[in-house]
Amino acid sequence: DNQSGIPSARMAYLISVHNKRTIHDGAFLLKALMETSHPGNTAIILIHVDKRVGVASREDDSSQDEENKNKFLYDDSPLKKYVDACLATPLCTRVDGSNSNENATILEVSSHFSPEWSKWSMNDPTLWAMDYLSHHSLLQRAQSRNMTSPKLSWDVFINLSGDTLPVISAQRIAQLFEPNQGPLGNTNFVTSSSCVTGLLPTSIYDFPNGWMKRVHYFQRHIPKKLSYVDLTTGEYLIDDEIDIYFGSQWMALTRDFVEFVVRSMDHPNGLGNVLKDSMVNTGVSMTDETFFATMLMNSPSFEHTLPVLNEVGALARFPTMYALRYERMDENTPNAWGEFRSVEPLYDVPPKFSKNTDGEAAAKPWGPYFLGVYDLGNIRDSGAIFIRKVSSTVDENLVNMLPVVRKSESPRNLDLPAWEWDELPDINWPSLGVKIKDPFVWRYYDEAKEQKENDYNNE
């Protein structure tokens, strides 16, 4: 591999799955991360399974709980099969370090929380993973299986939904995030492509008066002044103005910031703990979009880790990247009547979707919407590293295509470096839209024709 000599970060991932579809599609995500990684790059993968599903095993469970039809969704899934197969090889290990291969990926599956949409509990799996990575005795900063050359057990934390796919290989992701030389190194990303201010979080004051997100928080008297201990200086700040920022639930964070968040949650008067209490007590929604972005933007010691943008909104150190994650949402583009209108067509779920996903409904009107091949042009132009939502039940072409590997030349401009995104075809939604017709069946045609004739004769 001609890229293997490039310095790389040691990546720690959290994959969250919550239903039949995300558990099934999570297998494709795990496979992509494991099989496109250079040894040692993908250091840790934590998988959190929604507690309402759980990780019960048919072999170990003798109860006759027939009411819980989801009880064995994980145990019967391709994700579970892939985890077991990986742990049976030297490539993966449990966190106990029983595997002598120091480049083995630590792979752990847990089920602790039942996040509810728009509630604070949406943050629980991410905070659990941060706590796990920061406090586990075998994952401390100087820990290494080879103590003659100690190294960090992980450098960068990225949380992912099971219906996510990487656009580029896990090896290239690790290279881009390398803390010292990587163009994404030592940078905290807390937004996605649907955020109106791009790679930087959006201040609540940037939303126009009357905008849903602004109104919702102001009606609950947030932002507000908070009193807390600044864990960097040790100073107790009284009635400090904490501005609210919107970002994304899905992030890529430096180790320093992750450990800072954990410390601020552990301390009873830390900013994280005080901010959480304020959000929970006032009952605000969308805290998964605001908590981490607000923490980052109100912590001066991490100001230098914000993405630096060029004049067109791309990352200055990697000017082909406009978003860390590409997703389609219309939540920021309602019309004058508050209705959400897509500027382009979007994928609807096929008739068999409900059966194959155990009754899951279509996406919410404002998104995020499922992605497919017609979105490839926008994915290509965004320079995003991850995309969501992707499902084999909606368009398996993306699952078969991603991640991509760069070639020796750039098809866009031979004077510029070649990037993986150049390998994506520039396919966009047809200007007149797309309407899918069911397969033609003669029997149905004859029946419809006969019915039409009968109706005519009966008139």
Image: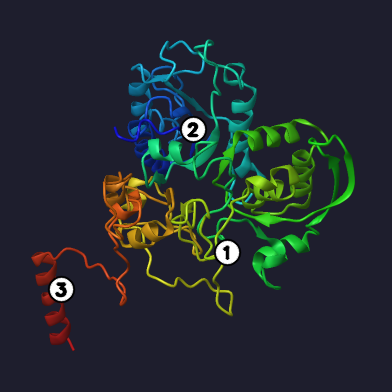
Give whichever of 321, 359 is nearer the camera: 321
Q: Residue at x 15, y 76 (%)?
A: 451
Q: Of label 3 and label 2, which has the lower sequence position? A: 2
Seen in the picture, residue 375 relative to 396 is either above or below; the reply is below
Q: Residue 287 versus residue 408: which sits nearer the camera?
A: 408
- Res 206 quadrant in image: bottom right
User: Is residue 299 among the parts visible in the rendering?
Assistant: no
Label 1, secondary structure: give it: loop
Q: CA–CA distance between discs 3 and 1? A: 49 Å
Q: Position of residue 173 (x, y in %)?
A: 43, 40
Residue that badge 2 annotates: 9
Q: Residue 270's spot in the image, x, y percent?
A: 79, 37
Q: Is residue 318 visible?
A: yes
Residue 429's x, y, as percent? 32, 68
Residue 164 appears left or right of 95: left
The residue at the far bottom in this view is: 459
Q: Nearer the viewer, mark 1 or mark 2?
A: 2
Looking at the rendered structure, the kind of residue marked 3 is Ala
Label 1 environment density (alpha carbons within 10 Å; few <14, some 14–19, many ≥20): some
Write down the residue under mark 3: 448
Residue found at x 88% / y 38%? 235
Which labelled disc corresponds to residue 45? none
Amino acid identity at mark 1: Val
Left or right side of 53 for 409: left
Distance from label 3 to label 2 (Cα)?
62 Å
Indicate whether 448 appears above or below 384: below
Quadrant that contains the C terminus: bottom left
Q: Earlier in the sequence, mark 3 or mark 1?
A: 1
**Residue underneath mark 1:** 196
Residue type beneath disc 2:
Ala
Mark 3 or mark 1, whichever is nearer to me? 1
The residue that appears at 25% across and 67% down in the rendered structure is 436
